[in-house]
Image: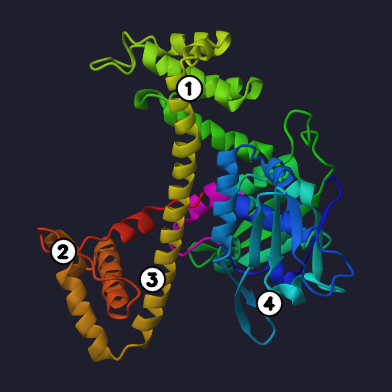
Amino acid sequence: MDKRLVIKSNFLVEASYKLSAIEQKIILSLSTKIKKEDQEFKKYTFNLGELSSFLGLNTNADYAYLQETTRALLSKVLILKKENSLLQTHWFESVEYFEKTGTVSMCFSPDLKPFMLQLKENFTKFQLKYAIQLKSRFSIRTYELLKQYESIGTREFLLTDLKEMLGVGPEDYPLYGNFKAKVLLVAQKELQAKTDIAFDFEEIKVGRSVGRIRFTIHSQEVPLVQETADTPIGKQDFIDEKLNQLVALLPQAYQDKHSIRKLLQEAVKKNDFDYVMRNIIYSNDRSNAMKPGSNPEKGSNYRVYLAKALRDDYGLAYLEDQQVKKEAEQVRQKTFAEAEKQKQRERNQIDQERENREKARVFISSYAPETLETYAGEARKRLSPDSLARYHRKDPIGLFEFKRRLEDVVMEHTGLRQPQPETASGLSENNHDDREASADAA
C-alpha cells in the first residue's frame, strides 16, 4: 500500500460531488487498481477481508455496512464541467459481492473513462496512503485540490466555487465563520499532521464579506505520525466510529462526560470492541446509574463500576450466562447494523430532499408571474401566524420560512414530493424539511 498511486484527470479533481469520507476512500482505493495499459474499465476485484481491514472494518456487521455504503454509492451523482458541456453521471457501473470467495468486484462508470484511463496530460497524482488517513470528507477533497497545484505553490478560489467542489451545499455552513471552523481549519490541521503537503490561507473580501480564498501550499516531509504497528492506515476512522457506538450504550447522563469518553477511548485501544461492550453492559446493570431516581452527580457510582470492570473484565463472567451472551450478540449484530443502515437511509433522504429543493428552485425561476403568485398564495397559507407576521414585515427568518413553504408547494405540484398530511392546526408537516434544514455535514 505504501506506494499505491491515485491518478485522476484535473477535470475529475475539480468535479462537484458530495461523498462521505468512507465513500471517497473506496473510490480512491479502487482507482489504484487501474493499470497504465487499461483501455477499458475492468471489474477490479478486492479480497473482502483485506479491503474491509484497510478501511477499518473487521466484523460481519461492518461487512453489512460496507455493502450498504457501496449500494448508496451506485446512486451518487457527480457533475463534471467539461470544455463544451456539463456531464452528470455516476461513479460505479456495478458492485458485486461473492460470498463463497470472500471478494467484491467493482467497475467504474464508462462515462469516467476520459478522466481516469490513458491519461497523458492534465492529471493529478498522489499517494493513496496520505488521503486514506484523513478523517474529514472535506479534508480529502481539499488535499486533492491543493495537491493539483503543489508545484505552483498557490491556488485561489471563489468561495462559492470552493464550496461547490468540496460538496458543501448551499444550506451547509451558510455563515462563513462556521465554514472556516468546520472545513478550512479542520483540513489545515489534518493535512499538516498526516500528509505530504500543508497550507495557509488568506481571506479576500468582496464587498463586506469574504468572497475568495487564496491558499499557499507547502510541500513537507512526511509527518512522523504515519503508519504504526497498532494503527493501520484508515483504521482511525473506524476506531472513532466504534467509540461513538460504545458511547451510545452508556446511560444518557454520561454520554457527554469527557472523563467517560476518555476511559472508553483508552480501553478500546488496549482491548477489542466486544471486551469494552460487555463491560459497559455489566456496569449499566450493576451500578445504580440506571435505577429510577438516581442522580448522575450524587450517589451514582457508575464511573467506579465502569473503570473497575474495564480493568478486570468483570463483564466476561457476567456474560457467561448464555442468554445474556445471546442478547449481547443481538445488540452487536442487529442494533449496530440496523443503526448504520438507518443512518444511511436518513442521509439518502436528506440528499434527495436537497436535490428536490434545487429542482423546485429551477421551476420557481421559470414560472410565469401569475402561476408563481398562485403557488405563493398557497405557501402563505401554510405559514403559522407568527411566521406570516415575520414574512409581512420582511424579517429574514420569515422570508426564509416562506421560501421553504413555496418550495414545498412546488415540489408537491411537480410530483417531487407527495402532498404532506395536515396537522390539527391546518399546517402541513415537513419532517423531511426539518431534517434537511438542520443537517450538519461535518
Q: Is residue 269 above or below residue 434?
A: above
Q: Residue at x 56, y 46 (%)?
A: 64
Can you tell which of label 1 and label 2 is closer to the viewer? 1
In space, the residues marked 3 and 1 are separated at their CA atoms by: 47 Å
Q: Earlier in the sequence, mark 2 or mark 3?
A: 3
Q: Are marks 4 and 3 in contact (CB under 8 Å)?
A: no
Secondary structure under the numbered disc 3 in the rendered image: helix
Residue 197 in view? no
Colour mapping used in the image: rainbow
Left or right of 120 in this view: 209: left
Q: Which numbered disc, 1 or 2, marks the residue that appears first in the sequence?
A: 1
Query: How far is mark 2 from mark 3, CA to CA?
Result: 20 Å
Q: Earlier in the sequence, mark 4 or mark 3?
A: 4
User: Which range is magenta?
Assistant: 167-184
The tally of labels here is: 4
Q: Position of residue 384 (x, y in %)?
A: 15, 62
* Contact (Cβ within 8 Å) of mark 2 with mark 3: no
Q: Which residue is mark 3?
A: 357
| Residue toward you, 269 or 189 | 269
Q: Residue 101, position in %: x, y?
A: 72, 49
Question: As shown in the figure, which amino acid type bears the numbered disc 4?
Answer: Asp
Three-letter amino acid code of the residue under disc 2: Glu
Residue at numbered disc 4 = 111
How busy is the neighbourhood of tag 4: few (under 14 within 10 Å), some, or many (20 plus)? Answer: some
Residues at circles 2 and 4 in contact by the CB criterion of under 8 Å = no
Residue for badge 1: 325
Q: Left or right: 67 with respect to 148?
A: left
- Return the residue at label 2: 422
